[in-house]
Image (cartoon, grey):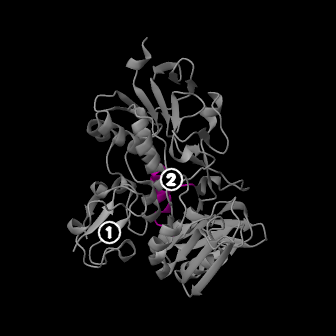
């Protein structure tokens, strides 16, 4: 068949998939578009999963539109609860089991998967990860009527959840094998400010050990840490990290590294297959944040509508949703050298990372100092100019 | 005074508080926020905000 008559197929209906299609629809009103999703296809904002307990929002309340409503609004076809099992790049087909589906262009927007902890014991069924709306719904029903939550991990999601669930009335223990909170994002002084803020909400931190074993103990759970300490809790959240989903891309023969390797046009090693969002590695960068995802959605929509366009990343500060001590951080690239210069005043920390010529390459702001981000953004170089 | 929420990332604009770090003084009504304003967390424009009940 003439492949140009086949639709553009997008795998995934998260922020990356839906925002790409919204932008593409503006530019190409007649284009046939098929979206395929392994879940129920409801449109929701993933960052809002981190503030759901404090605002007491159920999963249904966080869902902004059903798949059917999105299909009608965007004039597209959406296949829900459908898992793509194979991609045949040479034949321009994806397969759902035995069923082939032709595409003219294929977009991979299937996101990142949670890294699962290796924990001994018989309570694996009480360890939850929250990576999408359905996970959130499952966890909310598991936490119903419970008092204590143990969070594994003190990165962005672990800290956001600690703040949110403390606001939601839970007693929180955080266990993480690191010396400080947010170790990949913040210098120690800023991390300390966040830790003190969260401790003020009653959050208890156990930094250094891992959770090695969790067992049922009557109605409660007993967690043993690698330093021998034992904690009692009711439910466990694992927030130890995310990694781009690669399985199908590897099987399809696409080039992968940490993520699916794409160029500035978000094109994979196969000409008619593109990737964006949490699964994509753009010129060596895997950035699991909304701002780069939106920039990618706008650029890729243009490319798919016929105007080849490279994505640009300007300054991309990351907001950590810990309202007790707000955090905005623009971490310096790993490859650059320089030094942190830090001013601290209680919860208010301003840390600037500058090279030997005094040029600003990154910053971390907490508390009232987040006000200064606009001025600092003007000084920072763009990430991908 | 109303609150507005970005439907993409959840950032909230509270008219009463304004957003001094974005150059919007306290009390700035949403209709008076410049048309080229973009969400500080995710970069979408004014059309992607929705009004949230107080």
| Structural crowding at the residue carrying mark 2, measured as other residues with C-alpha within 10 Å and reported as few (<14), some (14–19) or many (≥20) | some
> Is disc 2 placed on a helix, strand or loop?
loop
Question: In this rendering, do the residues under marks 2 and 1 share a single chain?
Answer: no
With A63 as the anchor, is A185 left or right in this view? right
Residue picked out by circle 2: A313
Magenta span includes A231 = no
Q: In this view, does A283 lie above or below A87?
A: below
Q: In this view, does A107 lie above or below B30?
A: above
| Structural crowding at the residue carrying mark 1, measured as other residues with C-alpha within 10 Å and reported as few (<14), some (14–19) or many (≥20) | many
Q: To which chain does the residue with label 2 belong?
A: A
Marks 2,1: beta carbons within 8 A: no
Q: Can residue A272 be seen in this view?
A: yes
Residue A112: where, in percent of width, then height? 56, 47
Q: Is residue A29 above or below residue A101?
A: below
With A2 as the anchor, is A125 left or right in this view? right
Viewer-nearest of discs 2 and 1: 2
Task: Check residue A5 in the rendering and tell me which mark sits there, or answer none.
Answer: none
Query: In this orientation, which residue lies closer to the viewer: A133 or A127?
Result: A133
The residue positioned 50% from the left and 32% from the top of the image is: A83
Magenta-colored span: A129-147
Which residue ends up furthest to the top in the rendered image? A1
Q: Can residue A220 be seen in this view?
A: no
Residue A234: where, in percent of width, then height? 58, 66
Residue B49: where, in percent of width, then height? 30, 58
Which residue ends up furthest to the bottom in the rendered image? A345
Quadrant holding the N terminus of chain A? top left
Residue A107: where, in percent of width, then height? 48, 34
The residue positioned 60% from the left and 39% from the top of the image is: A260
Magenta span includes A140 = yes
Distance, label 2 to label 1, CA atoms, is 24 Å
């Amino acid at each position: 068949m003439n492949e140009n008559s086949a639709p553009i197929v997008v795998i995934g209906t998260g922020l990356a998939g839906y925002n790409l299609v919204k932008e593409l629809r503006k530019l190409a009103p007649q284009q046939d578009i098929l979206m395929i999703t392994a879940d129920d296809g409801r449109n929701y904002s993933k960052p809002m999963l981190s503030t759901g307990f404090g605002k007491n929002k159920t999963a249904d309340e966080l869902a902004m539109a059903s798949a059917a409503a999105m299909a009608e609004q965007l004039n597209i076809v959406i296949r829900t609860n459908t898992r793509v099992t194979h991609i045949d790049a040479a034949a321009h087909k994806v397969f759902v089991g035995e069923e082939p589906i032709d595409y003219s262009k294929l977009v991979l927007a299937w996101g990142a998967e949670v890294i699962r902890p290796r924990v001994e014991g018989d309570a694996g069924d009480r360890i939850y990860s929250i990576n999408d709306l359905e996970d959130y719904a499952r966890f909310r029903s598991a936490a119903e009527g419970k008092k204590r939550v143990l969070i594994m991990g003190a990165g962005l999601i672990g800290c956001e959840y600690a703040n949110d669930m403390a606001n939601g009335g839970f007693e929180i223990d955080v266990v993480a094998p690191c010396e400080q909170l947010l170790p990949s994002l913040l210098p120690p002084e800023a991390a300390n400010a966040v830790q003190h803020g969260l401790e003020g909400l009653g959050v208890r931190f156990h930094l250094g050990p891992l959770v090695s074993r969790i067992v049922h103990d009557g109605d409660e759970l007993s967690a043993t840490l690698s330093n021998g300490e034992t904690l009692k809790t009711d439910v466990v959240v694992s927030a130890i990290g995310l990694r781009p989903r690669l399985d199908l891309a590897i099987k399809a023969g696409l080039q992968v590294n940490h993520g699916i390797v794409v160029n500035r046009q978000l094109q994979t090693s196969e000409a008619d297959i593109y990737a964006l969002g949490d699964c994509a590695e753009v010129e060596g960068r895997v950035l699991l944040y909304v701002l780069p995802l939106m920039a990618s959605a706008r650029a890729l929509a243009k490319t798919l509508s016929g105007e080849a366009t490279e994505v640009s990343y300007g300054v991309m500060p990351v907001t950590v949703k810990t309202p007790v001590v707000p955090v905005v951080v623009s971490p310096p690239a790993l490859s650059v050298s320089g030094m942190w210069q830090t001013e601290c005043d209680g919860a208010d920390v301003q840390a600037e990372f500058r090279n030997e010529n005094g040029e600003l390459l990154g910053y971390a702001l907490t508390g009232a100092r987040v006000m200064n981000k606009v001025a600092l953004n003007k000084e920072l170089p763009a990430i991908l100019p | 005074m109303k609150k507005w929420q970005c439907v993409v990332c959840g950032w909230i604009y509270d008219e009463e508080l304004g957003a001094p770090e974005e150059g919007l003084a306290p009390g700035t009504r949403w209709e008076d926020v410049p048309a080229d304003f973009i969400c500080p967390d995710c970069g979408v424009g004014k059309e992607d905000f929705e009004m949230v009940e107080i």
